[in-house]
Amino acid sequence: MDTDAQIVELDTTDPHALIATAAAFEVTATSPSTHYARTWLQAVEGGEVVGVAELELPLSENTDVAWAEVQVLPTHRRRGVGRALWQAVVERSRAAARTRVGGEVTVDVATPGPAREFAAAMGTVDKHREDHLVADLPVATSPVDPAYEVVTWRGRCPDEHREAYLAMRNQMNADVPTGELDLEPEVLNDERLATSEERLMRAYDVRVAAARRRADGTFGGYSLLFVPHGTDYGWQDDTLVMPEHRGHRLGAALKTANYADLPDDVRLVHTWTAPSNTAMHRTNTGLGFRVVEHMYEVEAPIA
Ligand SMILES: CC(C)(COP(=O)(O)OP(=O)(O)OC[C@H]1O[C@@H](n2cnc3c(N)ncnc32)[C@H](O)[C@@H]1OP(=O)(O)O)[C@@H](O)C(=O)NCCC(=O)NCCS
């Protein structure tokens, strides 16, 4: 598929970029989510795709917001292609009654590219920052506090844990630091979780490690990891320790429980953490993660 070839080619400009695999893109493109409407735009010059944009309109929460991503081939930059794609995205966002466009701007720590300058020229301001970190596997396993046991599953959460897992997922959405971003947290119910699990499993090996307190069976935290099918890396999604279970180093234990279970050919894990999130940042660097990029969440008013 043309679009996929284009995405892979862009990858070569950024050694640490996490690029959607063809399988993940196909799931998103061919089975639309009921919670997000997504549109892809191409800039075409002389029959060649020279730039792409993705527009995502949340439909369930944050219906005043649009999310955008713009990419232009290195050989075709500084000729207004990015601006034209951005303007097309803004037009569509306005037509869908959105009053702000947000996006993630990622810059390599060693060799920052043009993304920040472009985003500023499009009228965005910074709302939040996270570090993008990577760790080479294997990493040393962190022991789990003896008061807890680790429960793991792949893919769909087993029925007997779903209620506790949903409570933790919703706590995560409410608790994760998002700086000055003014966003409603996503609220998951069983049906929404099931649909999301089904879609994700088509593109990823989805792995969850959760901590259960031995004394009363209460779940105290979970860590969620995705390994795109056919790749040699994983990316760390949520890690949450519930407020009354904090202070037992469960975050590190859960993350490393997931890593220890991975096939040997998975060699690298990506994660994103706000520098202000001291507990998680320290956990990550303690495990051997190193900062490779800075990710800025930016937003432009378009009303
Ligand atoms: C960022 C990116 C999309 C810009 O695409 P582009 O087609 O080169 O952008 P444009 O030519 O339309 O530039 C628009 C404005 O952005 C700013 N800009 C873009 N690149 C810049 C650079 N290298 N240095 C300084 N300013 C820059 C300028 O103000 C420019 O206007 P000007 O040329 O009139 O001065 C492109 O470099 C890219 O694909 N980078 C990798 C992906 C990425 O980081 N995307 C942004 C995150 S959504």
Image (cartoon, rainbow, N blue to C red):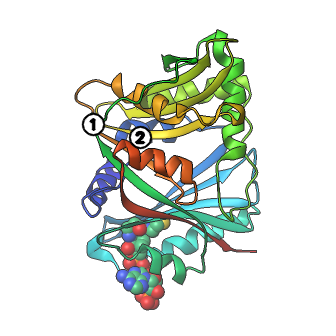
Residue 154, position as x, y percentages in the image? 47, 19
Residue 261 locus on image (x, y percent): 35, 22
Whichever of callouts 1 and 2 sits on the residue coming sooner in the sequence is: 1
In the rendered image, which residue does mark 1 sit on? 137
Name the residue that disc number 2 marks.
235
Q: Quadrant of ligand 1?
A: bottom left
User: Please, what is the three-letter code of the amino acid marked with disc 1?
Assistant: Leu
From the Cβ of disc 2, is ligand 1 less than 8 Å away? no
Element at label 1: loop
Amino acid type at mark 2: Trp
Q: Answer few, some or many: residues within 10 Å of disc 1's Cα (few below 14, many 20 plus, some between 14 and 19).
A: some
Q: Is residue 198 above or below residue 13?
A: above
What whole-number distance in Å separates the C-alpha atoms at marks 1 and 2?
A: 12 Å
- Tell me: residue 231, above or below residue 182: above
Question: Does residue 129 sit above or below 160 in this rendering?
Answer: below
- Residue 78 visible: no
From what the image shows, is residue 7 above or below residue 140? below
Which residue is at 29% across, 31% downward?
A: 230
| Residue sitting at x 42%, y 27% | 258
Determine if residue 298 is in view.
Answer: yes
Q: In front: 88, or 115?
A: 115
The answer to whether the beta carbon of the residue marked 1 is less than 8 Å from any atom of ligand 1 is no
Residue 91, image x, y percentages: 64, 70
The secondary structure type at the circle numbered 2 is: strand
Is residue 236 shown left or right of residue 14?
Answer: right
* Mark drawn on residue 265: none
| Towards the viewer: 108 or 241 | 241
